[in-house]
Amino acid sequence: MKAMVIAGLVVLAACGGGGQSNANKVNRDTLTERQQDSILAKSSIPGASAVGKAMNAADSTSARVNASDSVH
């Protein structure tokens, strides 16, 4: 299970750049990357549900990290 989560996060990270640095992009879109990913996850494109699962896994991991940081 952990391997699938990590693999999904790696895939998202690899796809997020698009070959351009964020500083060089022209901001034509009004949606954030997370909003775009959320729309994609809800689409009927084959494999799109994996994007939603990876987003949930990232949110869960982030929540756990924040919780452990607040304990220390």
Image (cartoon, rainbow, N blue to C red):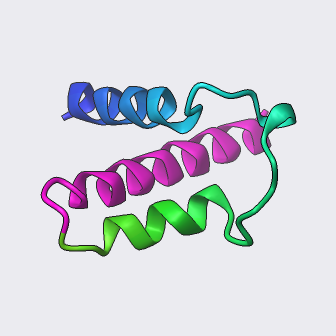
* Quadrant housing the C terminus: top right
Q: Residue furthest right?
A: 23
* Residue at position x 47%, y 51% in the image: 60
Q: Is residue 64 left or right of residue 38?
A: right
Horizontal and vertical percent position of residue 65: 62, 38
Q: Nearer the viewer, residue 55 or 15?
A: 15
Residue 58 location (% of width, % of height): 48, 46
* Side of 4 where 67 appears, left or right: right
Which image quadrant for residue 55? bottom left
Q: Is residue 5 above or below residue 33?
A: above
In depth, the one of 9 and 40 nearer the eye is 40
Q: Is residue 10 magenta?
A: no
Which residue is nearer to you in this view: 68 or 5? Answer: 5
* Of the pair 25 and 59, the residue shown nearer to us: 25
* Residue name at image x 74 percent, y 37 percent: 69
Say if the magenta span includes residue 56.
Answer: yes
Q: How many marks?
A: 0
Report whether 43 appears left or right of 36.
Answer: left
Residue drawn at the location 35% of the way across and 28% of the way down: 6
Q: Residue at the location (67% across, 70% down)?
A: 31
Q: Look at the image and tell me in which quarter the N terminus lies.
A: top left
Q: Percent position (x, y) of residue 36?
A: 53, 65
Q: Main secondary structure of the magenta part?
A: helix
The magenta segment: 45-72
